[in-house]
Amino acid sequence: MQQPSSKNKTLKINEIFYSLQGEGKYAGKAAVFVRLSGCSEGCPWCDTKYAHTVNAELTPQQILAEIAPCGAKTVVITGGEPTEQDITPLIDLLHKDNFEIHLETNGSKDIDTTNIFCTTVSPKTHTLEEMLKKANVIKVIIDDDITPQKLLNYKKYLNENTELYLQPEGNKQENIEKCLKIIKQNPSLKLSLQLHKLINIR
Ligand code: SF4
């Protein structure tokens, strides 16, 4: 039996929806979200555990057909962990169609980011140094476990193309206080709130 070429291979999708970016450097920007299913990292406080469910299996062309009618030319590829599937054909297709591609990843797979407008790496246990070097945004979740030393290690990746954001886990007040304290001591860092949770949108 003939195997589908990689550009026609399906991706496991949890959801595709049109909304506003809620986090990080482009918070407030209208974008279509493509949430891929699955993540093997297993963070205890993960707020996208529902992304383990596969609701559709779509080729890049079928994904493009869902995105196009939304009108926005910004696409956020997220998860779960999107790089656990082969997203290169999807990125190539969207790039060819002049989409501004944003990728949200834990950085555990070293992928080609040439055609990606903004790569946001949120460091976790298996994050690769190569991906921290390629990141445009490093978004560190601030919870009980983060140590100041671990956090400040990420500062070495800051440059004119890379910003470092602190995001309080769950928008919790105690984590917000921690972020504020660290940012005031390290003014090159910035705060990222989960805006979509504050204004109750997806
Ligand atoms: S890396 Fe992200 S998606 Fe994966 S378990 Fe952790 S928080 Fe959830």
Image (cartoon, rainbow, N blue to C red):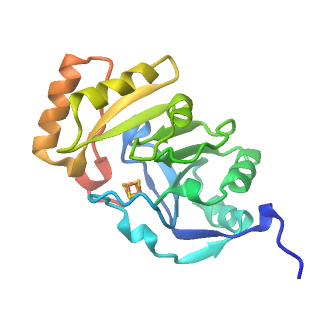
* Number of marks in the rendered image: 0
Left or right for 148, reference 51:
left
- Quadrant in which ligand 1 is drawn: bottom left
Instruction: Please say if 101 is above or below 163.
Output: below
Asked whether residue 25 appears in the rendered view, the answer is: yes
Left or right for 40, reference 155:
right
Image quarter hosting the C terminus: bottom left
Q: Residue at x 49, y 47 (%)?
A: 104
Instruction: Please say if 99 is above or below 87.
Output: above
The spot of residue 62 in percent (x, y) is 70, 69
The spot of residue 133 in percent (x, y) is 53, 28
Q: Residue at x 69, y 56 (%)?
A: 90
Residue 147, quarter of the rendered image: top left
Image quarter hosting the N terminus: bottom right
Left or right for 63, reference 167:
right
The spot of residue 45 in percent (x, y) is 26, 58
In the image, farthest residue toward the right? 2
Q: Residue at x 60, y 54 (%)?
A: 71
Q: Residue at x 51, y 47 (%)?
A: 108
Instruction: Please say if 114 is above or below 40.
Output: above
Asked whether residue 190 appears in the rendered view, the answer is: no
Left or right for 22, reference 35:
left
Viewer-closest of 157 and 76: 157
Viewer-closest of 48 and 33: 48
